[in-house]
Amino acid sequence: MTFNGFHAADFETFHIEGLDARMEAIRDRIQPKFRLIGEQLSGEAALLAGQEMFLHIAKHARRTVNPPKDTWLAIGPNKRGYKALPHFQVGLFDDHVFIWLAFIYEATNKQQIASLFLKDMEQIQQIVPQDYVVSQDHMQKEATFLKDMSEQELEQSLIRFRDIKSAEWLVGRHIDASNPILQNGDAFMKLASETIERLMPLYKLAGQALHS
């Protein structure tokens, strides 16, 4: 099977009432697509990273009442889990798809990663295109285009990530649900591959903090 794109029904999943009904739709509509996407991207990421990369698909297992507002796949270097290490994510809310290099609050050595990034702000700005977005909370839709952030604001986002235990730092792309590229499986996969390739130097830079 090949990935044939995201379509209206995928985004409408997040308007289904009730935890069980929404989770059933996520499992039926979205997770098979995640497996196709993730199997290709994890292989590509492994070649770029020079290490084995493993696919994880969010299970939302801790939820008992509230249905998830989004869902995602993660690609990272640990077979047992992804949250403690830098990883790549592809996922969707009801109005957009996201492709992230993610440093979430569970990340070990987050202070060292943030400090390394703060020392090398110029390199980050060289790696990350201006039309990419930065988020400080993977649970929220909001993100800011790099082109709309001053150097001071970018610095403050990294200081917050370093100093606040619950803070996160994610960088990548948002693609609006209405963008026709999402309905073209090949075009989306090309975009996702390009995004991971573009962000890989930042992933490797974070790896220096983990091994320092």
Image: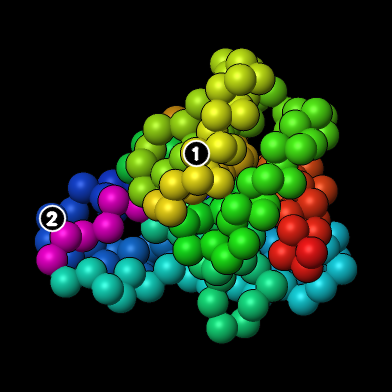
Residue at label 2? Answer: 17
Range covered by the magenta-colored residues = 65-70
- Tag in front: 1 or 2: 1
Name which residue lies at 48% across and 70% down: 57
Q: Is residue 122 magenta?
A: no
Tag 1–tag 2 contact (CB < 8 Å): no
Q: Is residue 14 left or right of residue 134?
A: left
Q: Which mark is residue 82?
A: none
For marks 1 and 2, give the CA distance: 35 Å
Depicted 147 relative to depicted 44: above or below: above
Q: At label 1, which amino acid type do we have?
A: Arg
List the single residue furthest toward the front: 163
Residue at label 1? Answer: 160
Depicted 194 relative to depicted 127: above or below: below
Can residue 196 be seen?
Answer: yes
Label 1 environment density (alpha carbons within 10 Å; few <14, some 14–19, many ≥20): some
